[in-house]
Image: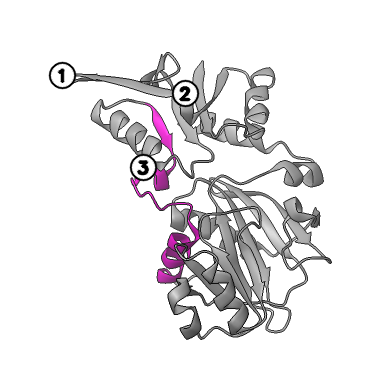
Amino acid sequence: MKKILILSKVNDHRLRSFSQQNRIQTNVETVTATYESFNGLINGNKVRFFIETTPLEDFDAIYCYKMFGFEEIVTLINCYLSAISAKTVLFDKAVQSHSKWIDRKSWEYLTLSSQNFPVIPTHYTFSQNAQKCTASFPCIAKQTYLSEGKGVWLCQSQQELIELTAKFPNDLFLVQPFVKNQGDIRAIVIGDKVLGTMLRKNDKDYRNNIALGGSGKVAKVDEAVEQLAINVANCLGYTIAGVDLIQDTLSREWFIMEVNKGPNFDGFDEILKLDTAHEIVSFIAGSLKN
């Protein structure tokens, strides 16, 4: 039986979705835990790292679902498994790279832009340089470390941008022109396939996130758009990702809005009648067989 560990933060209710897979999956044991259960001991040249009392190397695979704020623990797990030449597979390529900045908008935009993906023109700025930002207005200003539409602001003028960034003097902001749209597309990518696509729209807010009151419905998109989502995830090394795409209503051009290494799937599953946790565990288990 394959033993798969799913790690996330405390109070992440989605861990329950993963743990329920034990009632569905055969020949797979899914163990869920939080990063705080990590512990270990170094004694001379002997090192052992555990989740609760289980050695990390006892798992066939480890999937770091939500990892922001716990990059240090993920790096330790990665280094430990490499040092002892464990057969445990750590998902995914991005995590294996040791980069602490993965799953950050700033790193994702830079990486995608360097590979000629259609990224929205983006200004990187701290508050002290906000007055020099030449973005067109209205603009969207994003803090780099938040998700679910949090830390995303609409500024109608340069003065609003200056006042906003002044409230967070130590935060890097990404400033982008507001893209006129009729909603955005959330595609969940698992491996080299798109599990499904959903159109998100919010008539009361500039953010279409379901978590902020947006509505969703099943969306059919061109094969080229699906392939774009797959290519984006592969470029970043995300084996499992939520890729958000937006189409400019004027130019009809598609842009990459955001990418999430550990995508939320509550609303997605409800609308598309899917079980994303099941698909993720099945994919990981299938990868181990190969």
Res. 119 visible in picture = no
Q: Dividing the picture into quarters, in which one does residue 156 lie?
A: bottom right
- Residue 104: image location, x then y, percent: 48, 56
Q: Is the Cβ of the residue at disc 3 closer than 8 Å to that at disc 2?
A: no
Q: Is residue 113 magenta?
A: yes
Q: Residue at x 70, y 61 (%)?
A: 185
Q: Secondary structure at mark 3?
A: helix
Which residue is disc 2 drawn over?
A: 37
In the displayed structure, 184 sits above or below 282; it is below
Circle number at residue 96: 3
Which residue is disc 1 drawn over?
A: 44
- Residue 152: image location, x then y, percent: 62, 64
> Could you tell which of marks 3 and 2 lies nearer the N-terminus?
2
In the displayed structure, 270 sits above or below 121; it is above
Tell me the mark number nearer the camera, choosing from 3 and 1: 1
In the displayed structure, 8 sits above or below 129; it is above
Q: Residue at x 44, y 62 (%)?
A: 170
In the rendered structure, which amino acid carries the disc numbered 3?
Gln
Q: Decide: few, some or many residues near mark 2? Use Cα within 10 Å; few <14, some 14-19, many ≥20.
A: few
The residue lying toward the viewer, choosing from 218 and 165, is 165
- Residue 259: image location, x then y, percent: 56, 57
Res. 11 visible in picture = yes
In the rendered structure, which amino acid carries the disc numbered 1?
Gly
Magenta range is 88-115
Q: Residue at x 66, y 27 (%)?
A: 16
The residue lying toward the viewer, choosing from 103 and 10, is 10
> Could you tell which of marks 3 and 1 lies nearer the N-terminus?
1
Q: CA distance from mark 2 to mark 1?
A: 23 Å
Q: Secondary structure at mark 1?
A: loop
Q: Is the Cβ of the residue at disc 3 closer than 8 Å to that at disc 1?
A: no
Q: CA distance from mark 3 to mark 1?
A: 26 Å
> Could you tell which of marks 2 and 1 lies nearer the N-terminus?
2
